[in-house]
Image (tube, rainbow, N blue to C red):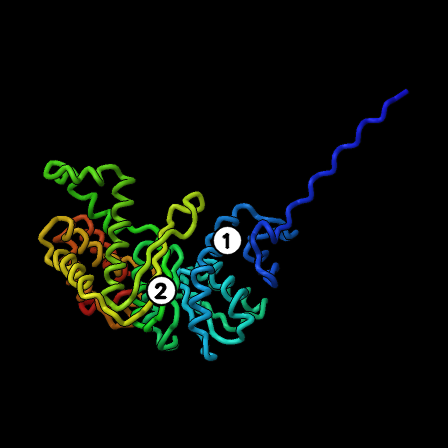
Amino acid sequence: MKKNKPAKPAAPAQQDVAAQLGLRPGQNLELLKALHILTREGKLNQDSRRKLKQVYHLYQFIAPLLEELSANDHPVTLADHGAGKSYLGFILYDLFFKNLGRGSIYGIETRAPLVQASQQLAADLGFDRMQFLNMSVAESTQADFMPAQFDIVTALHACDTATDDAIAFGLEKHAQALVLVPCCQAELAAAMRQNKALHLARTPLAELWRHPIHTREIGSHLTNVLRCLYLEACGYQVTVTELVGWEHSMKNELILARYTGQKKRSAAERLRAAWDEYEASETPEARFALSLDRLMPMIHNSLTEGRAWQANGVTADKVRHRAESISRGAPALGALAGKLIASSVAAGFLADPKG
């Protein structure tokens, strides 16, 4: 007699997606599908899970600020710089602004396809108090159609000096709070790489940045220290903490700055001392850092068809004069600046009075 095979145990029920993601009540699943956090079938997209975890953690820091600043029917305004696909902006709108019924989010991003996609998604979802602008952070600071004041400024993994541009935007717009998670920062690390052998001969402390990974991390750390000093000197109370566990992101430093109006004199003095050494250009590091500082706007203008040059009436003779200081600090960068100027003039991006 043929024995019946034992029945296979029933497959365990798939864990509810909402529980896996820690979704809030009423959260829009169609939004999560559009952001590719969920698949079209409503299943979890593992590749986006880490990004969502970072955004949720950041929301926990931002939500109390939104609650406080939206009191007394105030229409809170938030600028999200380096918005990318606007994960953060959409989640903030869905969880807070949508039900609040007032307030606006502005997403600033330089990549036009991402801006267009975000504009379309906001329209499809009826998120009518979200705006997406195709411009740099620096350009948005001077845009006359932007509100004169913003309550909160965020920058999640804004690359290189974009975090500094976000800080400048926040100061210009009298932001009550800045929430920053800096990304890669190359300027100071590049300066530290110069004359590394000479530094090693002069002091054993140069061992701290002898290896490339240490150069990068110490450069990033020192840059964030200067950012915090600057914010404190401008009247902000600054807290620095971790955003999420290191297994989710190596760029994990969260800078929370809340305006109090109490400007720390000691922070201003220490920052001024560091800045004076930089401007004096007496050390190789300071000269190289100054050269990079002067070169960055040229690179930006060459990539944006001279947008800032044209908007401010800058001509080639002024840019060439600026390039002279680049050559003094770093001849190779000076040569690059010369090529950028020549190609921009030839392409019609930069006006040349000499013809």
Q: Residue at x 26, y 57 (%)?
A: 296
| Sequence-first disc among 1 and 2 | 1
Residue 337 rendering spot, x and y as whole percentages: 21, 55
Q: Would you say residue 60 is visible in this rendering?
A: yes
Residue 22 rendering spot, x and y as whole percentages: 56, 54
What residue did someone put label 1 on?
A: 52
Determine which quarter of the picture holds residue 257: bottom left
User: Are discs 1 and 2 less than 8 Å apart at CB?
Assistant: no
**Label annotation for residue 106:** none
Residue ranking furthest to the right: 1
SS at badge 1: helix
Residue 19 rendering spot, x and y as whole percentages: 60, 51
Name the image quarter holding the C terminus.
bottom left
SS at badge 2: strand
Q: Residue at x 15, y 52 (%)?
A: 286
Residue 336 rendering spot, x and y as whole percentages: 22, 52
What residue did someone put label 2 on?
A: 178
